[in-house]
Protein backbone atom coordinates (compact mmCIF):
# COMPACT_ATOMS: atom_id res chain seq x y z
CA UNK A 1 0.00 0.00 0.00
CA UNK A 2 1.08 3.61 -0.44
CA UNK A 3 1.43 6.43 2.02
CA UNK A 4 -1.31 7.46 4.41
CA UNK A 5 -1.47 11.23 4.66
CA UNK A 6 -3.49 14.14 5.96
CA UNK A 7 -3.74 17.36 3.92
CA UNK A 8 -4.90 20.66 5.37
CA UNK A 9 -5.76 23.63 3.16
CA UNK A 10 -7.62 26.90 3.66
CA UNK A 11 -8.03 27.30 -0.12
CA UNK A 12 -10.23 24.74 -1.84
CA UNK A 13 -12.95 24.71 -4.53
CA UNK A 14 -15.57 25.90 -5.14
CA UNK A 15 -13.48 28.96 -4.24
CA UNK A 16 -11.52 30.03 -7.31
CA UNK A 17 -7.85 30.96 -7.50
CA UNK A 18 -4.32 29.71 -7.89
CA UNK A 19 -4.03 28.28 -4.37
CA UNK A 20 -7.39 26.58 -4.73
CA UNK A 21 -6.31 24.98 -8.01
CA UNK A 22 -3.02 23.84 -6.48
CA UNK A 23 -4.66 22.33 -3.38
CA UNK A 24 -7.33 20.54 -5.38
CA UNK A 25 -4.91 18.98 -7.86
CA UNK A 26 -2.32 17.95 -5.28
CA UNK A 27 -4.90 16.26 -3.07
CA UNK A 28 -6.62 14.69 -6.07
CA UNK A 29 -3.35 13.07 -7.17
CA UNK A 30 -2.73 11.56 -3.76
CA UNK A 31 -6.32 10.38 -3.43
CA UNK A 32 -5.77 8.35 -6.58
CA UNK A 33 -2.73 6.53 -5.17
CA UNK A 34 -2.83 6.62 -1.37
CA UNK A 35 -5.01 6.56 1.74
CA UNK A 36 -5.73 10.27 2.00
CA UNK A 37 -7.53 12.42 4.57
CA UNK A 38 -8.22 16.12 4.16
CA UNK A 39 -9.37 19.13 6.14
CA UNK A 40 -10.37 21.92 3.75
CA UNK A 41 -11.89 25.38 3.81
CA UNK A 42 -13.99 26.00 0.71
CA UNK A 43 -15.48 29.29 1.90
CA UNK A 44 -14.06 32.83 2.00
CA UNK A 45 -11.16 33.73 4.28
CA UNK A 46 -13.52 35.38 6.75
CA UNK A 47 -14.11 31.82 7.96
CA UNK A 48 -10.47 31.45 9.02
CA UNK A 49 -11.52 32.61 12.48
CA UNK A 50 -13.07 29.19 13.10
CA UNK A 51 -11.18 27.10 10.54
CA UNK A 52 -7.75 27.48 12.15
CA UNK A 53 -8.79 26.14 15.59
CA UNK A 54 -11.01 23.56 13.86
CA UNK A 55 -8.03 22.28 11.87
CA UNK A 56 -6.01 22.02 15.12
CA UNK A 57 -8.52 19.77 16.82
CA UNK A 58 -9.68 17.73 13.84
CA UNK A 59 -6.08 17.29 12.70
CA UNK A 60 -5.13 15.91 16.09
CA UNK A 61 -8.15 13.60 16.08
CA UNK A 62 -7.49 12.24 12.59
CA UNK A 63 -3.78 11.91 13.34
CA UNK A 64 -4.32 9.90 16.51
CA UNK A 65 -7.19 7.80 15.18
CA UNK A 66 -5.36 6.73 12.01
CA UNK A 67 -1.78 6.85 13.29
CA UNK A 68 -0.98 9.35 10.54
CA UNK A 69 2.74 9.67 9.97
CA UNK A 70 2.69 12.51 7.42
CA UNK A 71 0.68 15.76 7.48
CA UNK A 72 0.99 18.31 4.68
CA UNK A 73 -0.08 21.95 4.95
CA UNK A 74 -0.87 23.65 1.64
CA UNK A 75 0.33 27.20 2.38
CA UNK A 76 2.45 29.22 4.79
CA UNK A 77 -0.35 30.76 6.86
CA UNK A 78 -0.99 27.28 8.25
CA UNK A 79 2.49 27.16 9.80
CA UNK A 80 1.17 27.75 13.35
CA UNK A 81 -1.27 24.86 12.84
CA UNK A 82 1.70 22.72 11.91
CA UNK A 83 3.53 23.58 15.14
CA UNK A 84 0.60 22.38 17.26
CA UNK A 85 0.22 19.18 15.22
CA UNK A 86 3.95 18.50 15.43
CA UNK A 87 3.82 18.80 19.22
CA UNK A 88 0.68 16.73 19.73
CA UNK A 89 1.04 13.99 17.11
CA UNK A 90 3.94 11.81 16.04
CA UNK A 91 3.56 12.85 12.42
CA UNK A 92 6.14 14.57 10.27
CA UNK A 93 4.85 17.95 9.11
CA UNK A 94 5.55 19.43 5.68
CA UNK A 95 4.32 22.65 4.10
CA UNK A 96 4.21 24.27 0.65
CA UNK A 97 5.23 27.92 0.35
CA UNK A 98 4.01 29.89 -2.67
CA UNK A 99 5.43 33.39 -2.22
CA UNK A 100 3.21 35.98 -0.59
CA UNK A 101 2.46 33.49 2.20
CA UNK A 102 6.00 34.07 3.45
CA UNK A 103 6.73 37.63 2.22
CA UNK A 104 3.54 39.35 3.44
CA UNK A 105 4.74 42.58 5.00
CA UNK A 106 2.68 42.71 8.19
CA UNK A 107 5.19 42.83 11.13
CA UNK A 108 3.17 40.43 13.32
CA UNK A 109 2.88 37.99 10.42
CA UNK A 110 6.65 38.15 9.86
CA UNK A 111 7.29 37.60 13.56
CA UNK A 112 5.13 34.47 13.79
CA UNK A 113 4.72 32.65 10.48
CA UNK A 114 8.37 32.23 9.29
CA UNK A 115 9.33 31.15 12.84
CA UNK A 116 6.70 28.41 12.73
CA UNK A 117 7.60 27.28 9.21
CA UNK A 118 11.28 26.99 10.20
CA UNK A 119 10.39 24.44 12.87
CA UNK A 120 8.46 22.06 10.60
CA UNK A 121 10.09 19.00 9.04
CA UNK A 122 10.06 19.91 5.34
CA UNK A 123 9.38 23.08 3.35
CA UNK A 124 8.40 22.68 -0.30
CA UNK A 125 8.86 25.90 -2.29
CA UNK A 126 7.17 26.42 -5.65
CA UNK A 127 10.25 28.17 -7.10
CA UNK A 128 13.89 28.95 -6.39
CA UNK A 129 12.89 32.54 -5.68
CA UNK A 130 10.41 31.40 -3.04
CA UNK A 131 13.12 29.21 -1.47
CA UNK A 132 15.42 32.24 -1.32
CA UNK A 133 12.71 34.26 0.41
CA UNK A 134 12.30 31.47 2.97
CA UNK A 135 16.02 31.29 3.68
CA UNK A 136 16.14 35.09 3.99
CA UNK A 137 13.63 34.78 6.84
CA UNK A 138 15.60 32.22 8.79
CA UNK A 139 14.06 29.02 7.42
CA UNK A 140 16.90 26.46 7.14
CA UNK A 141 17.97 25.84 3.55
CA UNK A 142 18.44 22.11 4.21
CA UNK A 143 14.71 21.83 4.95
CA UNK A 144 13.73 23.53 1.69
CA UNK A 145 13.19 21.78 -1.63
CA UNK A 146 11.80 23.21 -4.87
CA UNK A 147 8.80 21.58 -6.57
CA UNK A 148 6.86 23.74 -9.06
CA UNK A 149 3.14 23.91 -9.51
CA UNK A 150 1.63 21.57 -12.08
CA UNK A 151 -0.94 21.52 -14.87
CA UNK A 152 -3.25 18.96 -16.40
CA UNK A 153 -2.40 19.00 -20.13
CA UNK A 154 -5.97 18.30 -21.23
CA UNK A 155 -7.56 20.99 -19.05
CA UNK A 156 -6.69 23.97 -21.25
CA UNK A 157 -5.79 22.59 -24.70
CA UNK A 158 -8.48 22.67 -27.40
CA UNK A 159 -7.76 20.27 -30.31
CA UNK A 160 -9.73 22.24 -32.90
CA UNK A 161 -8.74 24.13 -36.06
CA UNK A 162 -7.11 27.56 -36.01
CA UNK A 163 -9.89 28.98 -38.18
CA UNK A 164 -12.52 27.80 -35.70
CA UNK A 165 -10.51 29.17 -32.77
CA UNK A 166 -9.96 32.54 -34.43
CA UNK A 167 -13.68 32.86 -35.14
CA UNK A 168 -14.51 32.07 -31.51
CA UNK A 169 -11.87 34.50 -30.25
CA UNK A 170 -13.27 37.30 -32.42
CA UNK A 171 -16.70 36.70 -30.88
CA UNK A 172 -15.19 36.98 -27.38
CA UNK A 173 -13.35 40.25 -28.07
CA UNK A 174 -16.06 41.70 -30.30
CA UNK A 175 -13.64 42.75 -33.02
CA UNK A 176 -11.97 41.45 -36.17
CA UNK A 177 -8.51 39.97 -35.63
CA UNK A 178 -7.74 39.37 -39.29
CA UNK A 179 -3.98 39.51 -39.91
CA UNK A 180 -3.39 40.38 -36.25
CA UNK A 181 -0.66 38.99 -33.98
CA UNK A 182 -2.40 38.52 -30.64
CA UNK A 183 -0.56 39.22 -27.38
CA UNK A 184 -2.30 38.35 -24.14
CA UNK A 185 -1.86 38.82 -20.39
CA UNK A 186 -4.06 36.92 -17.94
CA UNK A 187 -4.14 37.75 -14.26
CA UNK A 188 -5.26 40.10 -11.53
CA UNK A 189 -4.64 43.73 -12.46
CA UNK A 190 -2.20 44.68 -9.71
CA UNK A 191 0.97 46.75 -9.88
CA UNK A 192 3.46 43.84 -9.80
CA UNK A 193 1.98 42.39 -13.01
CA UNK A 194 3.56 45.30 -14.90
CA UNK A 195 0.64 45.69 -17.31
CA UNK A 196 0.43 49.46 -16.89
CA UNK A 197 4.17 49.72 -17.59
CA UNK A 198 3.89 47.49 -20.67
CA UNK A 199 0.98 49.44 -22.18
CA UNK A 200 2.74 52.74 -21.48
CA UNK A 201 6.23 51.79 -22.66
CA UNK A 202 6.07 48.87 -25.09
CA UNK A 203 2.74 48.91 -26.92
CA UNK A 204 3.24 52.37 -28.49
CA UNK A 205 6.37 51.05 -30.24
CA UNK A 206 4.77 47.92 -31.72
CA UNK A 207 3.24 48.24 -35.17
CA UNK A 208 -0.49 48.01 -35.75
CA UNK A 209 -0.38 44.31 -36.60
CA UNK A 210 -0.18 43.61 -32.85
CA UNK A 211 -3.32 43.40 -30.73
CA UNK A 212 -3.03 43.08 -26.94
CA UNK A 213 -5.72 41.34 -24.85
CA UNK A 214 -5.82 41.99 -21.10
CA UNK A 215 -7.83 39.39 -19.19
CA UNK A 216 -8.66 40.01 -15.54
CA UNK A 217 -9.68 42.76 -13.19
CA UNK A 218 -8.21 44.58 -10.23
CA UNK A 219 -7.12 47.92 -8.75
CA UNK A 220 -4.86 48.85 -11.71
CA UNK A 221 -7.75 48.87 -14.17
CA UNK A 222 -8.32 52.63 -14.13
CA UNK A 223 -4.59 53.41 -14.43
CA UNK A 224 -4.36 51.14 -17.47
CA UNK A 225 -7.37 52.86 -19.04
CA UNK A 226 -5.76 56.26 -18.45
CA UNK A 227 -2.63 55.12 -20.28
CA UNK A 228 -4.72 53.77 -23.14
CA UNK A 229 -6.44 57.15 -23.50
CA UNK A 230 -3.10 58.97 -23.35
CA UNK A 231 -1.62 56.90 -26.19
CA UNK A 232 -4.83 56.40 -28.15
CA UNK A 233 -4.50 52.61 -27.94
CA UNK A 234 -8.11 51.58 -27.33
CA UNK A 235 -8.39 49.98 -30.78
CA UNK A 236 -5.28 47.82 -30.20
CA UNK A 237 -5.47 47.04 -26.48
CA UNK A 238 -8.68 45.32 -25.42
CA UNK A 239 -9.54 44.98 -21.74
CA UNK A 240 -11.78 41.92 -21.42
CA UNK A 241 -12.19 41.81 -17.64
CA UNK A 242 -12.92 38.45 -16.05
CA UNK A 243 -13.90 35.70 -18.49
CA UNK A 244 -15.43 32.25 -18.14
CA UNK A 245 -13.12 29.22 -18.20
CA UNK A 246 -14.28 28.24 -21.68
CA UNK A 247 -13.46 31.70 -23.02
CA UNK A 248 -10.09 31.68 -21.25
CA UNK A 249 -9.20 28.42 -22.99
CA UNK A 250 -10.07 29.84 -26.40
CA UNK A 251 -7.86 32.85 -25.65
CA UNK A 252 -4.94 30.67 -24.56
CA UNK A 253 -5.22 28.41 -27.61
CA UNK A 254 -5.62 31.10 -30.27
CA UNK A 255 -3.32 33.89 -29.04
CA UNK A 256 0.23 34.09 -30.36
CA UNK A 257 2.31 35.23 -27.36
CA UNK A 258 1.71 35.37 -23.61
CA UNK A 259 3.20 38.51 -22.09
CA UNK A 260 4.11 38.65 -18.40
CA UNK A 261 5.96 41.98 -17.88
CA UNK A 262 6.14 41.87 -14.09
CA UNK A 263 7.91 44.56 -12.09
CA UNK A 264 9.33 44.40 -8.57
CA UNK A 265 6.98 45.64 -5.85
CA UNK A 266 8.08 45.37 -2.19
CA UNK A 267 6.41 42.53 -0.25
CA UNK A 268 4.37 41.42 -3.28
CA UNK A 269 6.14 38.68 -5.22
CA UNK A 270 5.27 36.36 -8.09
CA UNK A 271 5.89 33.01 -6.44
CA UNK A 272 5.77 31.00 -9.66
CA UNK A 273 3.63 32.26 -12.55
CA UNK A 274 1.15 29.43 -13.05
CA UNK A 275 -0.47 31.11 -16.08
CA UNK A 276 2.79 30.62 -18.00
CA UNK A 277 2.56 26.85 -17.86
CA UNK A 278 -1.21 26.88 -18.37
CA UNK A 279 -0.59 28.82 -21.57
CA UNK A 280 2.35 26.59 -22.46
CA UNK A 281 0.14 23.50 -22.24
CA UNK A 282 -1.77 25.07 -25.16
CA UNK A 283 1.47 25.75 -27.04
CA UNK A 284 1.50 29.46 -26.24
CA UNK A 285 5.07 30.79 -25.78
CA UNK A 286 5.74 33.37 -23.06
CA UNK A 287 7.82 36.53 -22.96
CA UNK A 288 8.26 37.40 -19.32
CA UNK A 289 10.31 39.45 -16.89
CA UNK A 290 13.37 37.67 -15.55
CA UNK A 291 12.41 38.07 -11.89
CA UNK A 292 11.21 36.02 -8.93
CA UNK A 293 9.39 32.73 -9.48
CA UNK A 294 8.72 33.50 -13.14
CA UNK A 295 12.22 32.21 -13.90
CA UNK A 296 11.17 28.68 -12.97
CA UNK A 297 8.09 28.71 -15.22
CA UNK A 298 9.92 29.65 -18.44
CA UNK A 299 12.57 27.48 -20.12
CA UNK A 300 14.41 30.35 -21.76
CA UNK A 301 14.68 29.83 -25.51
CA UNK A 302 12.50 26.71 -25.43
CA UNK A 303 9.06 27.62 -24.04
CA UNK A 304 9.52 31.37 -24.19
CA UNK A 305 12.01 34.11 -23.38
CA UNK A 306 13.06 35.89 -20.22
CA UNK A 307 13.67 39.63 -20.52
CA UNK A 308 15.17 41.88 -17.89
CA UNK A 309 12.64 43.83 -15.87
CA UNK A 310 11.46 47.10 -17.52
CA UNK A 311 13.65 46.44 -20.58
CA UNK A 312 11.63 48.04 -23.37
CA UNK A 313 14.00 47.05 -26.18
CA UNK A 314 14.25 43.52 -24.79
CA UNK A 315 10.49 43.03 -24.91
CA UNK A 316 10.24 44.61 -28.36
CA UNK A 317 13.00 42.43 -29.77
CA UNK A 318 11.59 39.17 -28.44
CA UNK A 319 8.03 40.00 -29.50
CA UNK A 320 9.08 41.00 -33.01
CA UNK A 321 11.28 37.94 -33.45
CA UNK A 322 9.26 35.15 -31.83
CA UNK A 323 10.23 31.89 -33.56
CA UNK A 324 9.08 29.15 -31.20
CA UNK A 325 6.51 26.67 -32.48
CA UNK A 326 3.36 25.83 -30.56
CA UNK A 327 3.98 22.08 -30.94
CA UNK A 328 7.43 22.30 -29.36
CA UNK A 329 6.30 24.55 -26.48
CA UNK A 330 3.36 22.31 -25.65
CA UNK A 331 5.46 19.14 -25.64
CA UNK A 332 8.14 20.57 -23.34
CA UNK A 333 5.67 22.11 -20.86
CA UNK A 334 3.53 18.98 -20.64
CA UNK A 335 6.55 16.76 -20.02
CA UNK A 336 7.89 19.01 -17.27
CA UNK A 337 4.78 20.15 -15.41
CA UNK A 338 2.15 17.42 -15.72
CA UNK A 339 0.61 16.83 -12.29
CA UNK A 340 1.55 13.16 -12.60
CA UNK A 341 5.21 14.24 -12.53
CA UNK A 342 4.65 16.68 -9.68
CA UNK A 343 2.93 13.95 -7.65
CA UNK A 344 5.99 11.70 -7.95
CA UNK A 345 8.24 14.47 -6.66
CA UNK A 346 5.99 15.15 -3.66
CA UNK A 347 5.82 11.42 -2.90
CA UNK A 348 9.60 11.15 -2.78
CA UNK A 349 9.78 14.07 -0.36
CA UNK A 350 7.20 12.55 1.98
CA UNK A 351 9.01 9.20 1.98
CA UNK A 352 12.44 10.77 2.48
CA UNK A 353 11.34 12.89 5.43
CA UNK A 354 10.43 9.73 7.28
CA UNK A 355 6.76 9.17 6.55
CA UNK A 356 7.55 5.61 5.44
CA UNK A 357 5.14 3.28 3.69
CA UNK A 358 2.32 1.25 5.18
Image (cartoon, grey):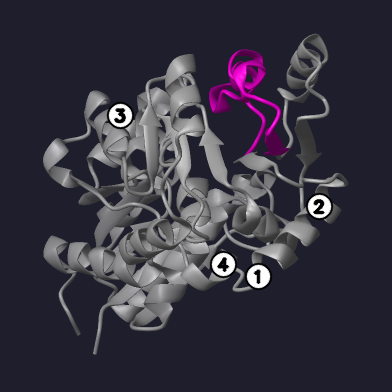
244, 257: nearer the viewer? 257
Q: Is residue 138 above or below residue 169?
A: above
Q: Which mark is residue 20?
A: none
Q: Write the residue at 73% across / 20% down.
A: 224
Q: Write the residue at 33% across / 36% down.
A: 295
Q: Residues within 10 Å of mark 1 (few under 14, many from 20)?
A: few
The residue that label 3 is drawn on is: 133
Mark earlier in primary sequence (3, 1)? 3
Q: Residues within 10 Å of mark 3 (few under 14, many from 20)?
A: many
Q: Write the residue at 74% across / 35% down.
A: 217
Q: Which mark is residue 170?
A: 2
Secondary structure of residue under mark 2: helix
Q: Which mark is residue 161?
A: 1
16, 158: nearer the viewer? 158
CA separation, marks 3 and 4? 33 Å
The number of numbered badges drawn on the structure is 4
From the top left corner, tell me how far across and down residue 40 is, in percent: 54, 63
Q: Nearer the viewer, mark 4 or mark 2?
A: 2
Mark earlier in primary sequence (3, 2)? 3
From the top left corner, tell me how far across and down residue 20 is, in percent: 56, 56
Q: Residues within 10 Å of mark 2 (few under 14, many from 20)?
A: some
Q: Write the residue at 16% across / 69% down.
A: 351
Residue 15 seen in the figure:
no
- What span is in magenta? 187-214
Residue 209 seen in the figure:
yes
CA separation, marks 4 and 2? 18 Å
CA separation, marks 1 and 2? 14 Å
The residue that label 4 is drawn on is: 157
Amino acid sequence: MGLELLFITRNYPPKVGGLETYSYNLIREFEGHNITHKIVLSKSNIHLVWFLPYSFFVGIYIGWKNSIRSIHLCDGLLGPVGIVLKLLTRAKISITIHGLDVTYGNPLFQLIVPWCIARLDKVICVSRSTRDECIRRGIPGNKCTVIPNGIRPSEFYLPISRDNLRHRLEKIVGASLQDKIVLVTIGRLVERKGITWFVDNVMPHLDKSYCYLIVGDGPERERIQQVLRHHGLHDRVLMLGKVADEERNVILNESDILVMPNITVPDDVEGFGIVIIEAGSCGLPAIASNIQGIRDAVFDGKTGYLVEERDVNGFLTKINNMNLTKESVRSIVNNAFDWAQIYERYSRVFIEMGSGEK
